[in-house]
Amino acid sequence: MTPLSRIALLLSYEGTDFCGWQMQDPSQTKAPSVQKTLQDAARGIFGETIRFHASGRTDAGVHALGQVAHADIPSRCLLNTNAHKILRSLNSKLPSTLRVLKVANVPEAFHAMKSAISKQYRYRILTGPADIPIASRFAWHLPYTLNIEQMKETLAALVGTFDFKSFQSAGTPLKSTTRTILSTDLGINADPFLNPFLSSDYMALDIRFRGTGFLKQMVRNLVGTLVKVGRGHMSPDEFSSLLEARDRTKAGVAAPSQGLTLEKVYYSDPLF
């Protein structure tokens, strides 16, 4: 058996043209997955199939600034190269929408998903009379103003351990839909996509969730319902009651995927 060495990669990708992280049946989608794109590039370098495992699956259209993945590569390859050369070689074969930012050697026991202790997601909303084309691939445009204070009050009440079944999209059955949110934040961002000369009618909002784990499309469902609070269609108390209801049909629609970005994956021993 060929001796293997484990490496971890810090990845960034613009998810618009990908069908998500995980490889899909070619008959079901024409868009490539991040996983297959990365593995195809690695095959061109190492001469064999290298399977990458991510900290979690991102859906079609979702972006990443700090996704983490690991893979086992033949130890002989490390004798003739180093982390920097692997980074450069992979990036030379990857499309411009996917980049390896860092590479590190890790212990065999490290697992990108199982070793993670928390993750942070950001959802960006752009409010204003019209969408801004340069921002449209990275934000959800809403043509009306939102009540920021009501939204902040709602977000603060989400910190803790709750059953988020009302905010879980259909998918693989789970033993538990209870998850822990460690922190939330809503900030008004001086976004580089916004023209500084635009009036205050335009605003970029960044909503962040850091948690130990998330259900399928949980963040997008939370944001979609949070917007109902911002529009005055739901009170913070009514939002909180959805946790007890454990009924997906009572919550709002999922926010579009393009506004969501995986910002950072946390480990007990920092990798990069």
Image (cartoon, rainbow, N blue to C red):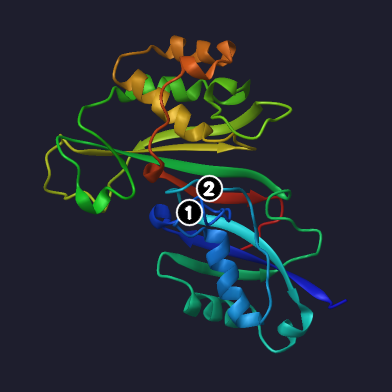
Which residue appears at 57% of the width and 60% of the height? 35
Q: Which of 186 and 53 is in front in this view?
A: 53
Disc 2 residue type (three-letter) = Thr
Q: Residue at x 63, y 60 (%)?
A: 69
Q: Who's the residue at 53% across and 66% down the image?
A: 37
Residue 153: percent from the left, percent from the top? 42, 20
**Image position of 120 (left or right of 180):** left
User: Which residue in the protein does label 1 denote?
Assistant: 64
User: Residue 5: x, y in percent?
Assistant: 77, 73
The label shown at residue 123 is: none
Q: In which quarter of the image is residue 90?
A: bottom right
Q: In this view, does 170 lie to the left or right of 203?
A: right
Quadrant position of residue 78: bottom right
User: Looking at the image, is 128 positioned above or below residue 113?
Assistant: above
Position above or below: 27 against 101: above
Give the residue furthest to the bottom. 80
Q: Is residue 7 above or below residue 163?
A: below
Nearest the camera: 215 or 249? 249
Disc 1 residue type (three-letter)? Ala
- Residue topped by disc 2: 58
- The local crowd at label 2, few if under 14, some if 14 to 19, many if 20 or more residues have their Cα within 10 Å, is many
Q: Which residue lies furthest to the right in this view?
A: 1
Q: Up-down: is 162 above or below 18?
A: above
Quadrant location of the C terminus in the rendered image: bottom right
Q: Where is residue 80 in the image (x, y as percent from the top left)?
A: 70, 89
Q: Circles 1 and 2: CB distance less than 8 Å?
A: yes
State the SS at label 2. Answer: loop
Q: Where does the N terminus fall, quadrant-wise?
A: bottom right
| Residue count near mark 1 (Cα–Cα under 10 Å), binned few <14, some 14–19, many ≥20 | many
